[in-house]
Amino acid sequence: MLIMAAKARTLLRGRFAVELNDINVLAPSVLRHRLVTSFEAEAEGVHRNQLISRLIETTPQ
């Protein structure tokens, strides 16, 4: 779904190729409901949005 959304965003912006920025912008919305944190993570205060932010930050540019 992330790739499909990125392709749609690219076309709506008049481009023909997906850029990393398209993925970074859409990732939180697409992944938020697909990630489930464990009880331990929730007890430690780790939330889905934090995990997604870490994924985006650690992805090589």
Image: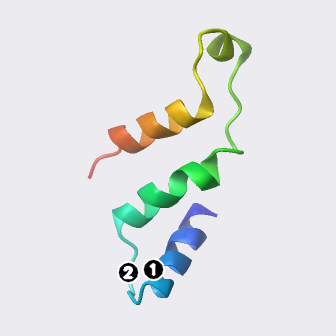
58 lies above or below 22: above
Q: Of label 2 and label 1, which has the lower sequence position?
A: 1
- As helix, strand or loop, the secondary structure at mark 1 comes to helix
Give the residue drawn at x 55%, y 49%.
28
> From the viewer's perspective, is 43 left or right of 3?
right
Image coordinates of residue 60 in percent, x first then y, are 29, 47
- As helix, strand or loop, the secondary structure at mark 2 comes to loop
Q: Quadrant of residue 4?
A: bottom right
Image coordinates of residue 9 in percent, x first then y, are 50, 76
Q: Quadrant of residue 5?
A: bottom right
> From the viewer's perspective, is 51 left or right of 16?
right
* C-beta proximity under 8 Å, tags 2 and 1: yes
Residue density around tag 1, few if under 14, some if 14–19, many if 20 or more, within 10 Å: some
Residue density around tag 2, few if under 14, some if 14–19, many if 20 or more, within 10 Å: few
Give the residue drawn at x 51%, y 31%.
50
Give the residue drawn at x 70%, y 19%.
38
User: Which of the labelled discs sits on residue 10, or is there none?
Assistant: 1
Residue type highlighted by circle 2: Ala
9 lies above or below 33: below
Task: Tell me how far mark 2 sits from mark 1, CA to CA.
Answer: 7 Å
Residue type highlighted by circle 1: Thr
Residue furthest to the left in view is: 61
Task: Determine which residue is flagged by label 2.
Answer: 17
56 lies above or below 30: above
